[in-house]
Image: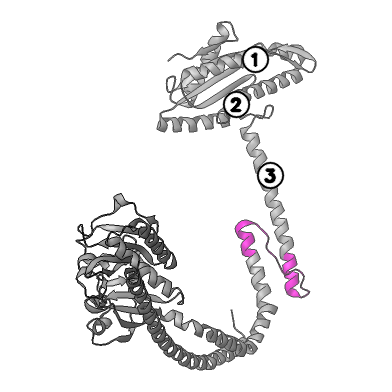
Amino acid sequence: MKISISIKLTAILCLFGLLMTGLASYYSLSNSKQILLDAAKRDLLIANQVLGRNLQLKLQGPANDARLLAEQPQPLQILLDHPNKAREQLALTRMFEAVLEANPEYLRLRLISAQQHGLELLSVARSGRQTSDTLKERGHFDYVFKTLQLVPGEQFLSEISPQRMDANGALILQLASPVWSEKAIGVVVLSFDVTGLLERLTSELPANYQVFLANNQGKLLLDPDYVSSQGQARGPDVLLQEQLPETLPLVQGKTSSLLAALPGQYNQTPRLATFTRLVIGQGDSQTALILGLAIPEEHILLASHELDQRMIRIVLGLSLLSLLLSLWLAKALLRPLNQIGHAIDHFTENLTFTPLPTKRRDELGKLARELHEMQQKILAQINELNENHIEMHRMAHGDALTGLPNRRLFFDRLEQAITRAKRSGKLIGLLYVDLDQFKEINDTHGHAVGDEVLRVVARMLTSASRESDTVARLGGDEFIILFDELENLGALQNIAKKLLARMQNRIFIHGHDLQISASLGISIFPQHGTDADTLVQCADKAMYTSKRDGRSRTSIASD
């Protein structure tokens, strides 16, 4: 189609406006994204420092609680077997329960004696106090024998490593304080969940922040990359410095903080990350933790999307004036032409109407109205042809008197059934029905009564067969029924027996009390034939055998 000069000029103006505004938008967006990245770096550093300081303070809390509980009089009196031991145990149990209730990350508090191989004297978990028969000897655990070797003022903190994780990926640590008399005679052990503590601390962080946690050897305790891709905590052999080589100086202790850009891996997009080395514990139990925070760059740049939208609106606004002409031309000329073309294509494909611009008062409206009239005439002619075709098909394959299939349609269905039966190995049955003394009814009462008798018999045969069976009229008073996928000969004999019994009833037609009966013949595929003509001939011969033997009975064709 030839493009007019007005459309060409409009397109040039639109392209020029889009180019100028696009260049300005690109420069502005590039600067704004860099500003957002710099601000995110500062926020990330501050958040990591605050989180690390809070973690140190929160880890100091269990140490203070364990020391405070060890300095209470009840543990000493229980360990020294004071006469009021039972009362002191009850008081200490309530104290343990109160501490557990106040600190969700605390899992269990125990009082363990230095005697009897480190026997537990009292153990209170979040589920309640353990009974005496479940208390065990714990002297072989490091949090018992190492704590008993400490000097006053020192505490034991278990090693921080992935091996301390439970099946749910929670990092469980043991913090122990000795109970002193003249020497250490027992320990108070506090079991707490560092992972739960960290989750509580990070719950106030934005949802898109990712937290890394590793011990002083770089073994990962929390790995958001692996959790996001596998749904569970990573195994104990993965090192932070191997997964993120940028953190090697931090693991080696050469620096206490690090800011790095992490490349995309483990289905993660590129991220900004900051890591801090934290010192935990005191004395010989002192160790280090590496805490990291990361945020995907795509979340940092979300704020620039609003600016993107503004720039897009500016581009659209500047381009709007140059587009008005092309929109008007499309609406005034191209749109109705396309609508007419679409209506023609749609009507050609499926003979259905689509809206046309028939209300227009110009030449296009006149063309649309004439096209609509032509479509209606064509559709009316097609409907008439279809109705004639249906009627011709019914007349060619149906019996005009009874509405049953005629001989031609019956033989067609029989041949199809034989083809299916040869593949499936199923039986096919034919039941040939011929009315007895039907000529006398016609001669005595007239053809009108005879025709009604044939229609009654047709309905009777149809009701005695299945929907998948075919009841046809071969001519005169002869009917035949095709039983597709027959189970056995006995089933067909039972149907014939019921049909003979039903036809013994008297019928009343046009005031005449009539008694009808029929002779039946049966043939079976493939026992009596493997083609349509042979099966019908065998059923016909069997029917004549029934007439010869006295009528109103059923005979089976000979093999």
Q: Position of residue 99 (x, y in %)?
A: 41, 66
Dividing the picture into quadrants, the one containing residue 510 is top right
Q: Nearer the viewer, mark 1 or mark 2?
A: 1
Residue at image position (24%, 82%) is 248
Badge 1 crowding class, 10 Å Cα cut-off, few under 14, some 14 to 19, many 20 or more, is: some
Name the spot of residue 468 as percent of width and height, x first: 55, 31
| Viewer-proximal residue among 85 and 368 | 85
Q: Nearer the viewer, mark 3 or mark 1?
A: 1
Q: Give the percent coordinates (x, y) of residue 375.
A: 70, 59
Answer left or right for 331 relative to 70: right
Going by the numbered disc 2, the residue's amino acid type is Ala
Report the magenta residues as a range. 344-370
Image quarter of residue 502:
top right
Q: Amino acid at mark 1?
A: Met
Q: Which residue is mark 1?
A: 503
* Side of 541 where 114 appears, left or right: left
Q: How is the image coloured?
A: one colour
Task: Find the distance from the CA under tag 3 to the CA under tag 2.
Answer: 24 Å
The residue carrying pointer 2 sits among few (fewer than 14), some (14 to 19) or many (20 or more) residues within 10 Å by Cα, namely many
What's the residue at 66%, 24% (across, down)? 459
Judged left or right of residue 440, residue 349 is left
Mark nearer the N terminus (3 vs 1) = 3
Please report whichever mark, 1 or 2, sits nearer to the chain's N-terminal start.
Answer: 2
Q: Are marks 3 and 2 in contact (CB under 8 Å)?
A: no
Kindly report the distance in space between the C-alpha atoms of the residues bearing marks 1 and 2: 17 Å
Magenta highlight on residue 354: yes
Question: Would you place residue 473 above or below residue 34 in this image?
Answer: above
Q: Residue furthest front?
A: 83
Residue that label 3 marks: 387
Residue 46 on image: x %, y %: 41, 86
Instruction: Decide which of 518, 179 is in the foreground and name it.
Output: 179
Q: Which mark is residue 238?
A: none
